[in-house]
């Protein structure tokens, strides 16, 4: 595994199934998530840059926080703290709210909250390039919507609201699936999720993490829901 360049100031590190990103500004660098099996994402980022490196978590699922203990502070939406246990007591939480701007120096990233997959799921929109770093909710792979605190209705509303930014987004860079995906996937995910909510898609069953789940094929992606949903 190694860093792959997306453009002159943007890199991705793919573990095989999950990836995280490194963004460079003129003053700071930002890791967007920190991997699952990786335990030295900050150290790996030093292969690319000597800039001060900060950490932003799109959410706190286990496959996004593998190297969080390398950092003295983490930027995250406070609604996600119900899912996040600090790796060391001294770690500082820097709250990031909807509409906040993270400025890396000549590179501004706008936070857009997308609750549903998790309560505090948050994407970052690069105002310079139009890249949307979306976390998990928008992808062409498997979207986990089973377990505690997943909410399909909130997910649908989040995707509908994201359409306000359609003209600003040039591509969607998720932590799973194809990189990038076109914004057109958003309407297809909305349609598929609405059909699931209305009971119009018959699910198959699967066992995952010791529980039986419903698997919904919505065409562009697969939604994994609670059994009996």
Image (tube, rainbow, N blue to C red):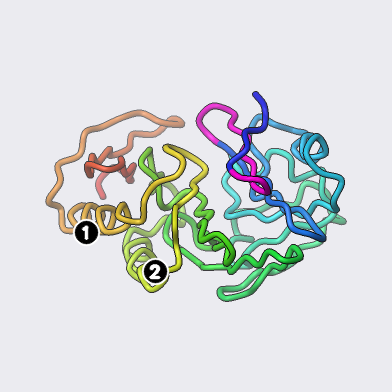
Neighbor class of circle 2 (other Cα within 10 Å; few <14, some 14-19, many 20+) is few
The CA distance from mark 2 to mark 1 is 24 Å
Tell me whether circle 2 and circle 1 mark residues in contact (CB < 8 Å): no
Secondary structure at badge 2 equals helix
Secondary structure at badge 1 equals helix
Residue 108, how many percent across, how many down?
66, 67
Please give the range of residues in magenta. Answer: 7-18
The residue sitting at 68% across, 56% down in the picture is 56
Residue 52, how many percent across, how many down?
85, 53
Q: Earlier in the sequence, mark 2 or mark 1?
A: 2
The residue sitting at 79% across, 44% down in the picture is 69
Seen as rendered, the residue at the extreme front is 8
- The verdict on residue 16 being magenta is yes
The residue sitting at 75% across, 52% down in the picture is 86
Residue 130, how many percent across, how many down?
51, 61
- The verdict on residue 2 being magenta is no
Q: Image check: 202 left or right of 65?
A: left
Q: Is residue 39 above or below residue 157?
A: above
**Residue picked out by circle 1:** 194
Seen as rendered, the residue at the extreme top is 1
**Residue picked out by circle 2:** 167
The residue sitting at 41% across, 31% down in the picture is 208
Q: Image check: 61 left or right of 227?
A: right
Between 35 and 26, the residue placed more toward the observer is 26
């Amino acid at each position: 595994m190694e860093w792959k360049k997306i453009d002159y100031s943007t890199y991705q590190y793919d573990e095989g199934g999950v990836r995280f990103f490194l963004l460079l500004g003129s003053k700071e660098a930002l890791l967007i998530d920190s991997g699952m099996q990786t335990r030295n994402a900050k150290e790996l980022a030093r292969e690319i840059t000597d800039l001060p490196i900060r950490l932003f978590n799109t959410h706190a699922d286990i496959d996004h926080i593998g190297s969080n203990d390398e950092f003295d502070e983490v930027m995250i939406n406070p609604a996600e703290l119900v899912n996040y246990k600090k790796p060391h007591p001294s770690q500082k939480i820097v709250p990031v709210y909807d509409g906040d701007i993270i400025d890396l120096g000549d590179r501004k990233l706008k936070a857009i909250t997308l609750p549903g997959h998790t309560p505090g799921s948050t994407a970052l929109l690069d105002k310079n390039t139009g890249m949307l770093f979306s976390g998990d909710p928008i992808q062409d792979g498997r979207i986990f919507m089973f377990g505690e605190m997943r909410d399909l209705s909130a997910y649908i509303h989040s995707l509908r609201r994201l359409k306000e930014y359609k003209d600003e987004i040039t591509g969607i860079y998720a932590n799973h699936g194809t990189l990038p995906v076109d914004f057109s996937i958003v309407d297809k995910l909305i349609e598929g999720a609405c059909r699931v909510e209305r009971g119009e898609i018959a699910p198959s069953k699967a066992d995952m993490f010791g529980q039986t789940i419903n698997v919904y094929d919505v065409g562009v992606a697969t939604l994994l829901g609670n059994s009996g949903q």
